Amino acid sequence: MTATASGVAAHIGSGAGTHGSRRRSAGWLGFSPFALYVLLFLAIPTVYAVGSGFFTKDGAFTFANLAAFANPTIIGDFVSSFWVSAVVALLGAVLGAVVCYALMGTKPDGVLRTIVDSASSVLAQFGGIMLAFDINALSPNGPLLYQVAGLVFPYLYFSVPLMVLTFMPAMEGMRQQWAEAAATLGASRATYWRRVALPILAPAFWGSTVLLFANAFSSFATAAALIDQGGIVPLAIKQQLTSETVVGVSNTAGVLALGMIVVMVAVMALYTALQRRARRWQR
């Protein structure tokens, strides 16, 4: 009996292992189209764009092109990109958090919540030529909108909905028992938010803010439709692709792409760390 039971167990284990391997194989097979898409349209273009900054026009490898980062115009473009993205991220985060707080008083499956969620999903992706057209229609004679500082307004248009989408799950994760426990211990509503809710929500809030920064920093189409010249890094890359303006430096567009990649990697690493900290309260 023992030998028979052992044989049956071994057979079942072998079959389970085979089925597990088949499921993993099927999973990788289903993932392959997306992996191919990422490889062709993200990985290869990124490697090519960044790698081009390390070669001269004759194809010789060099580090001399990195001297472009010392050019005053390039430095100004990075500074402008940083402060515009930072302003958009902070304003969008605060406005989006206010919207999320207001939505907490509505039913999760109610009509208002459904409308706001659907609108946020659409508006968070609404940029480029269509957004620039709407901005022109609303304010055709506003000179500020056609300067770097004016990018704050159209960028907020898609940043606030993005904040609603990313920060709302953290707001919904707040448990009613925490507020009740604080009230039982004699804490006021303000004390609860200052001592309990805000510290818990802080990692998710700042993580969403970092995501808004990255989104604004990498935005191109809306800025390109509103501003003819450079002023921010994405527009500077476009300008360098059409006409090299940094004397003595080859493939400046690739050098700028390298700078953007470094910034984005640092920003997303910070976002990942904040999200990992925020998830500790969602378990």
Image (cartoon, rainbow, N blue to C red):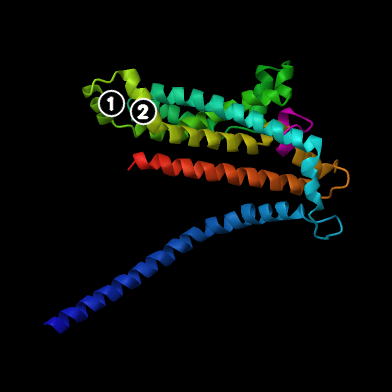
Quickly name the residue at label 1: 179
Q: Residues within 10 Å of mark 1 (few under 14, many from 20)?
A: some
Marks 2 and 1 close (CB-CB < 8 Å) = yes
| Residue 134 located left or right of residue 176 | right
Depth check, front residue: 274 or 59: 274
- Type of the residue with mark 2: Ala
Q: Residue 272: where, in percent of width, then height?
A: 49, 44
Residue at (46% x, 63% y) in the render: 28
Residue, far bottom: 3
Mark nearer the N terminus (2 vs 1) = 1
Residue 105: image tag: none
Residue, far left: 1
SS at circle 2 = helix
Tell me which corner region of the image, top left, top right, bottom left or bottom right, holds residue 106. Answer: top left
- Does residue 183 belong to the magenta stretch? no
Quickly name the residue at label 2: 197
Instruction: Specify whether residue 81 is in view.
Output: yes
- Type of the residue with mark 1: Ala
Residue at (45% x, 22% y) in the render: 98
Q: Which residues are magenta?
A: 225-235
Q: Residue 82: where, in percent of width, then height?
A: 66, 33
